[in-house]
Image (cartoon, rainbow, N blue to C red):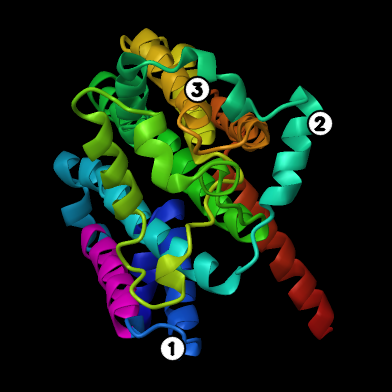
């Protein structure tokens, strides 16, 4: 058994080990607070399945050398992150009852002397709403598109570094959501039931909007959590991961960089136009995104990398532990 664990430690990459730690933490939360969630067993099962899936693709060594397996070990994070995001939404909604929207509204008004979601009213047209709702709803595919291009155009190491930046960014985002729970201007400054009338589209805006609203709360089945809006506005994940993807694309001079720039810029603007975010959410998100992108560019230059930070921290912790025993 010890040999198996040693081999797994060797074969698992940094973000896989980190993801297993997150899954185990989620299991512990679900079990510890099982009285809060009637579907706590389902949550535990999901996390155990994710852990099993990661281990299967990392072991044995001769299996993971296949190019198709290496690519799969990057692509499957698309589904893993989504599953963990749903659970993060559930936990934050349950444990953080009181959002901080009043503070965010005050900051926006201090900066702009008005609510930015009101300031864009003169731009509202069905065609623009149609376009922006689609770009906003498909935001998740911005980093995916860049990742696929890296897999095709570049080597595995570059694609892995970009994937690592996105995965670590999401785990940071989950912590920030819990620290700064906010439900967004659709629920505070505006009447959520009037969004379809005040931001009408042409054909696809309405189904895309409802799909986004429903997909974020699949695992939330209990009251009062089910009737509470998600606390996932501060900071803006759309801004964080769009900036990372765009900066990476332009640094690497990929073929789709201008396409990603237009798509990403539209998605970020849509967060205000469609009333999902406050401007301060975008500013904070841009700050986080630029920091992560800076680490990523250094990783591309092979001067610095997230895993080195992890190794240095663990080495320092080991030294302090040994010194404490003397």
Residue under pointer 2? 110
Q: Nearer the viewer, mark 3 or mark 2?
A: 2
Residue under pointer 3? 269
Q: Position of residue 24 (x, y in %)?
A: 44, 75
Secondary element under disc 2, as helix, strand or loop, is helix
Q: Residue at x 30, y 22 (%)?
A: 130
Number of dots carrying numbers: 3
Mark 3 or mark 1, which has the lower sequence index? 1
Q: Residue at x 65, y 33 (%)?
A: 291
Front in this rendered view, residue 4 or 128:
128
Front in this rendered view, residue 125 or 104:
125
Secondary element under disc 3, as helix, strand or loop, is helix
Range of the magenta residues?
41-57
Q: Position of residue 12 (x, y in %)?
A: 37, 58
Q: Is residue 8 above or below residue 324?
A: above
Question: Is-magenta flag for residue 9?
Answer: no
Measured in 3D between alpha carbons, the distance from the residue under mark 2 to the one under mark 1, in whole angstroms, is 42 Å
Q: Is residue 276 above or below residue 120?
A: below
Q: Residues within 10 Å of mark 3 (few under 14, many from 20)?
A: some
């Amino acid at each position: 058994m010890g040999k198996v664990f040693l081999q797994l430690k060797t074969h698992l990459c940094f973000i896989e080990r980190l993801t297993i730690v997150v899954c185990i933490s989620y299991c512990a939360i679900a079990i510890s607070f099982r009285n809060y969630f009637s579907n706590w067993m389902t949550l535990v099962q999901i996390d155990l399945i994710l852990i099993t899936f990661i281990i299967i693709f990392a072991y044995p060594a001769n299996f993971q050398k296949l190019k198709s397996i290496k690519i799969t070990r990057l692509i499957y994070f698309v589904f893993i992150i989504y599953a963990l995001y749903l659970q993060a939404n559930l936990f934050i909604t349950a444990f953080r009852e009181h959002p901080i929207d009043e503070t965010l509204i005050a900051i926006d008004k201090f900066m702009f002397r008005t609510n930015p979601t009101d300031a864009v009213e003169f731009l509202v047209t069905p065609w623009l709403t149609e376009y922006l709702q689609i770009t906003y709803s498909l935001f998740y595919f911005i980093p995916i598109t860049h990742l696929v291009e890296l897999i095709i155009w570049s080597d595995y190491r570059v694609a892995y570094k970009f994937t690592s930046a996105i995965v670590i960014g999401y785990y940071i985002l989950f912590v920030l959501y819990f620290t700064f729970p906010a439900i967004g201007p659709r629920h505070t400054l505006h009447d959520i039931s009037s969004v379809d009338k005040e931001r009408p589209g042409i054909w696809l805006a309405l189904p895309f909007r409802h799909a986004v609203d429903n997909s974020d709360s699949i695992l939330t089945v209990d009251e009062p959590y089910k009737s509470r809006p998600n606390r996932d506005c501060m900071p803006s994940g759309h801004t964080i991961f769009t900036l990372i993807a765009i900066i990476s694309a332009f640094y690497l001079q990929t073929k789709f960089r201008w396409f990603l720039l237009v798509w990403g810029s539209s998605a970020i603007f849509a967060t205000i136009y469609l009333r999902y975010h406050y401007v301060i959410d975008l500013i904070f998100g841009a700050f986080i995104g630029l920091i992560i992108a800076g680490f990523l560019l250094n990783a591309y230059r092979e001067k610095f990398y997230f895993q080195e930070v992890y190794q240095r921290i663990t080495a320092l912790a080991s030294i302090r532990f040994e010194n404490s025993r003397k």
